[in-house]
Amino acid sequence: MALVSQAGPSYCIRTEIIRCKSGNHAGFSMTNNMEASKMKELYAGFLSLSCNSAKKAQMLHVDGPGVGCKRGHRVIVAASPPTDDAVIATEPLTRQDLIDYLASGCKPKTNWRIGTEHEKFGFEFGTLRPMKYEQIAELLNGIAERFDWEKVMEGDKIIGLKQGKQSISLEPGGQFELSGAPLETLHQTCAEVNSHLYQVKAVAEEMGIGFLGIGFQPKWGVKDIPVMPKGRYEIMKNYMPKVGSLGLDMMFRTCTVQVNLDFSSEDDMIRKFRAGLALQPIATALFANSPFTEGKPNGYLSMRSQIWTDTDNNRTGMLPFVFDDSFGFEQYVDYALDVPMYFVYRKKKYIDCTGMTFRDFLAGKLPCIPGELPTLNDWENHLTTIFPEVRLKRYLEMRGADGGPWRRLCALPAFWVGILYDEVSLQKVLDITADWTAEERQMLRNK
């Protein structure tokens, strides 16, 4: 659900950034040479996987020593919440502007990148209970100060961190998410995953907090999960029970790993979108990791995937229209225009627009803000509230896998990069799946 700036920041907020540097830390703020040598071995292992990778793979680096804490100036950060003033429209948006926005993601193969997002459950060692917001705030502050991340605030609450093109954000039930930077190689991706997990663990262990890589909360019910103080989640929480029986489970009890990949043209986007949808059930099966609910086996290998079948059918699923001969950016825009909205962000507040459409917004006919017209920020926000198995923004998101341990967080992007970024593999997949019907693809998804 969170945004990854694969093609640069997609929407912006004006927020106050508090930059902190603490202690004498270098690299990953190792406390002794033994830890440092272990990390060096870890990275050496990644880099030696391929004889060519050493040239390409770059170590992820955190700024070196610094002392004290200084309050920075106001800057623009790509994170939630969005802004209502970052894009000033000189004339009303048209449907063609929305199509052109998606098409602006096309880039030559030399500029293709790999963006990985993953979520995990935090819990107290003593009680196994989910982390409360106050503990999450302490954890975010600790990571910011020890590893030089910028803090992202909503009002007076810390809701995330940012460092370069990486961001850390909170899902509705406090699931802790890294939205990784767009990287050139899988070796860099795996180094980023391990750097993040190292930093989180270094701070969390001191607080008596652990993390679990799994697709569905295995022990606690929805009533036991604390709600994060983000305005958009309050609107979603009230709307979900109106459109499906499992939406609150999706919000508060699921974790995923997804990879975001580029395309070179509309035709390349269509081919990758179709291959991604056809094989998404295979990824779901390979990475299935959510068999427990409230302490007992739930009868599914991927309960997380089952939950998406009754969350909100207006915005989820296998998108059969992607396989129509007429499909392209334009058809995806027409689909998204009629997916019911959640909210509009104006004057630092989320306005409930549930059940209304972006098509109405485009015509200035939203009952929640009559006469107002949308900006590209509004469009980008709306695109993040659509949840199919593969999602189109200015890149494609592969969304079918359960969250898992670090090896699978590295494996999921490897699986999709191998299929979609290799022309021979991609064509073979399209050949194999060309005669599959919509019913067969849905059958695979169900199984």
Image (cartoon, grey):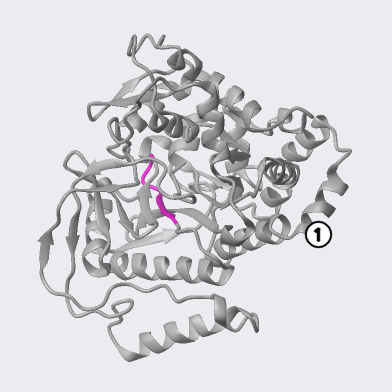
Write the residue at 67% across / 56% down: 416
Magenta-drawn stretch contains 54: no
Which quadrant of the figure has residue 298?
top right
Tell me: 442 left or right of 387. Answer: right
Residue 313, horizontal then vertical, whole percent = 60, 24
Q: Is residue 431 above or below residue 222?
A: below
Name the residue at the front extreme: 90
* Residue 310 visible, this orientation: yes
Span colored in magenta? 172-179
Q: What element carries label 1?
A: helix
Which quadrant of the figure has residue 310?
top right
Quadrant for the C terminus, please: top right
How many numbered badges does the structure rendering display? 1
Residue 286, horizontal then vertical, whole percent = 69, 55
Tell me: 271 left or right of 100. Answer: right
Write the residue at 61% across / 55% down: 108
Q: Is residue 121 above or below residue 221?
A: below
Tell me: 170 left or right of 247. Answer: left
Q: Nearer the viewer, residue 221 or 364?
A: 364
- Tell me the crowding category of disc 1: few under 14, some 14 to 19, or many 20 or more residues within 10 angstroms, Cα based: few
Q: Nearer the viewer, residue 165 or 302?
A: 165
* Residue 313 visible, this orientation: no
**As shown in the figure, which amino acid type bears the numbered disc 1?**
Val
Residue 106, horizontal then vertical, whole percent = 59, 46
Q: Is residue 5 above or below residue 230?
A: below
Residue on which disc 1 sits: 424
Tell me: 220 left or right of 257. Answer: left
Write the residue at 52% across / 56% down: 115
Q: Which of 90 and 410 is in front in this view?
A: 90
